[in-house]
Image: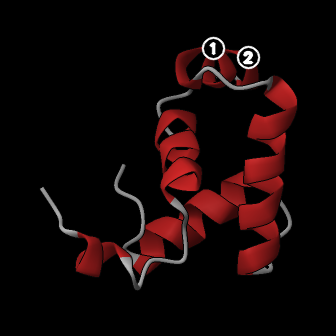
């Protein structure tokens, strides 16, 4: 398990990472919301925040960029 220092340089929050890990497993917004016990709107907000942080135009581009950066494994 990684300790807190290893996550300190991550662009993603813990929850954003959880959302994107489920997103790359082909889960829908509704399925992600149910699994994480949050609303669908909150899921969309997390995705939008990551898209904005990365300066990309959509979910797919965000996933590609996160993988390229080593932030996300698929």
Q: For the view shown, which residue lies furthest in the bottom direction?
A: 9
Does residue 25 sit above or below 33 in this rendering?
A: below
Asked whether residue 1 is in view, the answer is yes
Which residue shows up at 44% across the image and 66% down it? 67
Q: For the view shown, which residue lies furthest in the left direction?
A: 1
For label 1, the crowd category at 10 Å Cα-Cα, with few meaning under 14, some 14 to 19 and many 20 or more, is: few
Does residue 74 sit above or below 42 in this rendering?
A: below
Which residue shows up at 18% across the image and 68% down it? 3
Which residue lies under the disc numbered 1? 34
The image quarter containing residue 5 is: bottom left
Mark 1 falls on what kind of element? helix
Which residue lies under the disc numbered 2? 30
Label 1 vs label 2, nearer the camera: 1
Asked whether residue 27 is in view, the answer is no
Q: Is residue 49 left or right of residue 73?
A: right
Q: Is residue 51 left or right of residue 26?
A: right
The image quarter containing residue 27 is: top right
Mark 2 falls on what kind of element? helix
Q: Position of residue 40 (x, y in %)?
A: 81, 25
For label 2, the crowd category at 10 Å Cα-Cα, with few meaning under 14, some 14 to 19 and many 20 or more, is: some
Q: Are marks 1 and 2 in contact (CB under 8 Å)?
A: yes
Which residue shows up at 87% across the image and 33% down it? 41
The quarter of the picture where the N terminus appears is: bottom left
């Amino acid at each position: 398990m990684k300790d807190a220092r290893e996550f300190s340089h991550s662009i993603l929050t813990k929850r954003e990472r959880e959302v994107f890990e489920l997103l790359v497993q082909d889960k829908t917004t509704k399925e992600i919301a149910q699994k994480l016990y949050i609303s669908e709107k909150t899921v969309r907000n997390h995705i939008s925040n990551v898209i904005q942080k990365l300066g990309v135009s959509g979910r797919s581009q965000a996933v590609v960029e996160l993988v390229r950066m080593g932030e996300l494994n698929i």
